[in-house]
Amino acid sequence: MAVLEVRGLTRHFEVRPGLLARLVGQGQQQVIKAVEDISFSIGEGEILGLAGESGCGKSTTCLLITRLLEPSSGEILFKGVPINSLEGEDLKTFRRKVQIIFQDPYESLNPRFTVFDLIAEGPRALGLWDVRETEERVLAMLASVGLTPQEYRARYPHEMSGGERQRVGIASALVMEPELVVADEPLSMLDVSIRADILDLLRGLSSRLGFSCLYVSHDLAILSNIADRLMVMYLGMVAEIGSIEDVIADPQHPYTNALVEAVPAPDPRYRRPVPKIHGDIARPIDPPPGCRFAPRCPHAIDICRKDPLPALMETENHHLTACHRVGDLT
Amino acid sequence: MLLELDNLCVSYATRAGPVHAVEGVRLSIGEDEVLGLAGESGCGKTTLIKSLLRLLPKGARVDATRMMFKDADILTMGDRDFRRRIMWNEMSLVPQSAQASLNPVYRVGDQVIEAIREHVDMSISAARARVEELFDLVGLEPRLITAYPHEFSGGMRQRAMIAMALALDPALVIMDEPTTGLDVLVQERIIRKIRELREKSHHSILLITHDISVIAEMSDRIAIMYAGQIMEVAPAIALFEEPVHPYTLGLKNAFPSIKQIGKPLISIPGSPPSLLGGVDGCPFAPRCPFAVEVCRKERPPLKEIAPGHVAACHRSDEAPHMRNQASEKETWQFSKSVA
């Protein structure tokens, strides 16, 4: 069974016009369609990569599946149970079983807490274990993220490098024994030379502890290194989902294709091809009808500019693409 | 040579003692050349360019045996002279964060006009005409001249900063992380634009970034910096295909490529040394799997490996052997205690 199942998830934000515009009777209510009718699932022990440019709805999706934001419509099932009706003890369990690793290890750790207290905060807040068991588990977790417990337990965040801080961030998520971990660009603030260790650590712990992971990044090169499957979003819609090999090596959606071709390579002989798409990503305020990508798409035809959004269709073994023209382009 | 640096040292006075942010740097940039300078945070790359542009804070000390721009000694030149003759006229900067570098309450066009008129005598109308030309050059619509920064997207702001840097046709443009924080499609377009502009005006670029892919794509030559010192300088292709310094080897291992899905990445163990009070021996030795006794005692000088290719490593003669070993993960697990 899938750990997380998302069906038709939608989130709109209403933007009220300014006071002056309202007084003179101008200005209409605008709607930001941050996430529009997306569906996906994450299997047990699976790492799903989520890629897309700024403004594509990656962060809103993270907030929705961790129930830090309520959806406008659609369903989110965690182990088969809809999360938006959870209350009391069940909600507490959900909060424990779904954990987040934050982007910035410099901002996300309380500077007044020691490493031990940072990691113990979650278990203490939920009253999970007694004092002795909390200590045992926190120290064991420190060791699993590669920090010697005796050396690090009493340190403060300012006494550690970015990589060490991110290890503490990972430890405080994993000490809760989550079944789903949402990692929002956890490497983007770290230096290249230590990124590989953090990736290895996440992958190793995921297979040892058996948690599933939604790994969000705009960097396809990193995603191709850690993810089992890849989901690409564009302006609130899902453009493509499939195994990492299929999506990177054989992208079906014109947007994914442009995104993959635009990734630079660490090779001075390589030149990126000139992208076939034009223009900039639009803002998701009152988007035009039809496929969100149509205004920039070199293959768009009439049907692409009309509602509804193209649905995700399977081209081959679990490789899904939301494009009206997917059959014509291959 | 356009720019020649020898034994450039920059130190900051702190309460705990001097911090040697840049130490003994030897580097040169020729006419019509792109030199990429790569290194991790805290390696001194930003301090290095700030020392060139005289943007260092008070308390910073700059020293060099040679610091020449064309025929001018920019170490001893007076501040007034430097501002009039060199800054912006000969050497300009595209700063790290275009977002933070534009004043939000002034129109973007006016800010470029101001930059021009600060450095040359030019009438407002002539400066305005120059701005129109520049906006066209970098691919910004003319109507944006009278727009405010918040009306620009990230990529457009970066273009405006490039326009400003090119305003007086400088011989050297210093670009500090020009594409960091931009989405990959926008980044590709900016880099293509920078390359197009160079085909027309043949200015040199000193490109600073931690992104190895961007460096590879843009540079003629590449310099690798670590803990305030130059580790290796080589033509771009030689640096990628026949790297010598173990730090360069380690960086290459650690960088993911979309062309090799699932290729295991290898980290460099440990973290950079504190620059407080200076470092004895090779600064990379504590993290280097090939370090021997001499590496911890004597600082290796930059040695010529091939024409135009220098490296600061005591064991540079054994480069082929080190290259072989460095691609094995086990090599970098030589000591758990450094991590």
Image (cartoon, coloured by chain):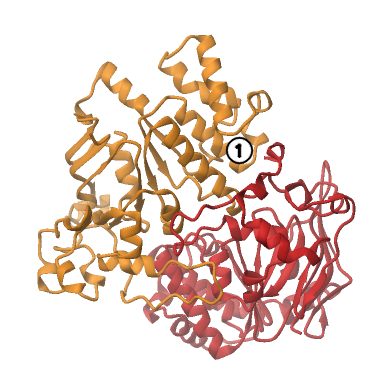
Judge left or right: residue A60 versus residue B88: left
B49 or B161, nearer to the observer: B49
A50 or A199, nearer to the observer: A199
Subunit that carries the residue with mark 1: A
> x, y percentage for residue B39?
66, 60
Can you say which quadrant of the picture contains the C terminus of chain A? bottom left
State the count of labels: 1
**Tag 1 secondary structure:** helix
Answer whether residue A260 is visible to the viewer in this image.
yes
Answer whether residue B54 is visible to the viewer in this image.
no
Q: Residue at x 47, y 84 (%)?
A: B137
> x, y percentage for residue A168?
55, 33
Q: Residue at x 24, y 57 (%)?
A: A285
> x, y percentage for residue A97?
35, 27
Q: Quadrant of residue A277?
A: bottom left
For mark 1, what is the residue?
A164
Task: State the hue of chain B.
Answer: red
Task: State the hue of chain A.
Answer: orange
Judge left or right: residue B48 versus residue B109: right
